[in-house]
Structure formats: structure tokens, C-alpha cells
Image: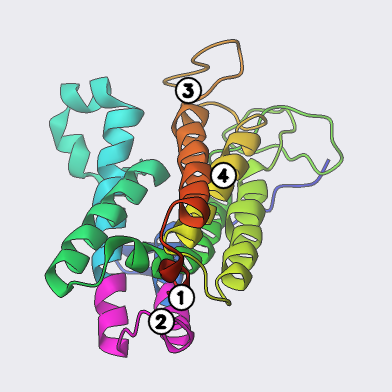
Amino acid sequence: MLIYPAIDPVAVRLGPLSIHWYGLMYIVGFGCAWWLGRKHATRSGIQLTHEQVADVIFWGAIGAILGGRLGYILFYDLPIYLADPISMIQVWRGGMSFHGGLLGVLLAIWFYQHRHQIGFFRLTDFIAPLVPIGLGAGRIGNFINGELFGRPTDLPWAMAFPHGGPLPRHPSQLYEATLEGLVLFAILWFYSRKPRPVMAVSGMFLAWYGIFRFSVELVREPDPQLGYLAWNWLTMGQVLSLPMALVGIGMLWWAYHRLPQSASASTP
């Protein structure tokens, strides 16, 4: 069993102001997306200026934060928030959902592309490779907070988390940081280096994220307020991720088999 590195969740204290590592991970994620987006714009056929890249990242960040919070409220803990509505805005107490954040980002992208006449899937294809680094950073933030840990196990790399009792558990946050962060980034970044049919890169993102998240949920402790939804293993994360994977696979099939061949000239 490995020793959990008890890192102070607060990175910096400035008098009454506390800056948490989890919040810094959001800054890292959005900052990397902006930096990668500038590089990606020079090799893609979408022809975004650096100013437009910054605008897309800004609105995407707004969508991710608002959608992530609203998604958590709706998908994971609605009765609690209905009983105490003021807690909906108390984001410092935690409670963010990736799937809600994804919907928020898609909505923000739709408004942006509608205003600038870029093309929805061309823009999502451009953004998809920029997202995984932020996802990985967020999981590192979860690890530092000692939250969203895995189920008990006797594997040699198991850890006993402060809020998980004395039993050693899967460090599922690190599994997700690796798969949803580093591996997914490598897949999308190298896949998007060559021209692909419109919608293909977006489909790859949805398919692989859904597969990775569904797999890690098999060893991740379910949310305590929900528990297992069925069969003593099905979690809310899996219920939300399986449709993602299926939609992504369907988008890939559609991109390569049903879209006009001329679309393949567009790069994400």
C-alpha cells in the first residue's frame, strides 16, 4: 500500500483569502487550452485568429463552470439543493459535473458559432483536442482534495484516503487523470494532425472519453448520496458516459460514411 501524500488543499493563503489547488487546476486547464488553441489554429483549416481563439476559450470556460455546477445539481443532488436553494451558488463547497460542463460548453459554442458563422462541428472539432489537459488537471485537483477516490482494493498501489476510512483504495483520480487527460490528449492531438472529416474529431472525443470514464467507474466509489443505481456496480457516471460513447461512435461512422467526401478536406 502506498502512503497518500496529504497535500494541503489550500495552495496559497493571503489573509482571509484562500486559493485552493482545485481552483488553480481550472486556471491550468483553461490556460493550456488557450495556449494549445493558438498552436492548433495555425495547423487547422478553421482559420481562427488568436483573438477568436481567446474568445472561444473564454466562452467555453463560462459554459464549463455554469454547466458543470448546474449538471451536478440536476444529476447528482437535486433534492438537497431544492431543500436549500442558496447552496446552489456556494461553489466553494464543491459539486461539479463533467457531463453538465460538457453540455454548457456545447451551448456556449453553439451561440458563438451562430454569431460568427463558423460551423458548429468544425468548431467542436477544433476545441476537442484542447480539452483533455484540463480534464487531467481537474482530476489531480480531486486527488489533492482526497475526494472521488476508488473502491477498496489490495493492489500494491492502493492508498488510504483521509475521508475514505482505513481501507486502502484505488487512486481512481489518478486513473482518470491518466486516461481522460494524458491518453485522450495524445489520441486527439495526433489524430487531428491530419485532415479529417467534419465531426470525426468530436466523435473521437466523445467515444474515448465515454469508454475511459465508464471503465474507471468500475473501480471508483459511487457518490454516497446516490450509491449504485443497479446491479451493485452501475453508477450515475456510467449512465451518463455510455450514451456519450455511443453517440461518439455514431458520429465517427456518420463522418466517414455519410457526409459528402468534400467535407474531408476540412480539418478540425
Circle nearer the viewer, 4 or 1: 1
Placement of 41 over or under 89, stated as above or below: below
| Residue where numbered disc 1 is placed | 265
Identity of the amino acid at label 3? Answer: Pro
Earlier-in-chain disc, 2 versus 3: 2
CA gap between label 2 and label 3 equals 46 Å
Earlier-in-chain disc, 2 versus 1: 2
The answer to which of 39 and 207 lies nearer the viewer is: 207
Identity of the amino acid at label 4? Answer: Gly
Residues tagged 2 and 4 counted as in contact (Cβ below 8 A): no
| Residue where numbered disc 4 is placed | 146
Tag 2's secondary structure?
loop
Q: Which residues are the magenta region?
A: 32-57
Residues tagged 4 and 1 counted as in contact (Cβ below 8 A): no
Q: Please name the residue shown 62% across and 32% down the image.
A: 220
CA gap between label 2 and label 1 equals 9 Å
CA gap between label 3 and label 4 equals 15 Å
Q: Which quadrant of the rendered structure holds the C terminus?
A: bottom left
Placement of 243 over or under 135, stated as above or below: above
Q: Please name the residue shown 24% across and 77% down the image.
A: 55
Residues tagged 2 and 1 counted as in contact (Cβ below 8 A): yes
Residue 63 location, quadrant: bottom left
Any mark on residue 45, and which? 2
CA gap between label 2 and label 4 equals 42 Å
| Residue where numbered disc 3 is placed | 224
Q: Please name the residue shown 30% across and 38% down the image.
A: 71
CA gap between label 4 and label 1 equals 46 Å
In the rendered image, residue 41 lying in the magenta stretch gets the answer yes
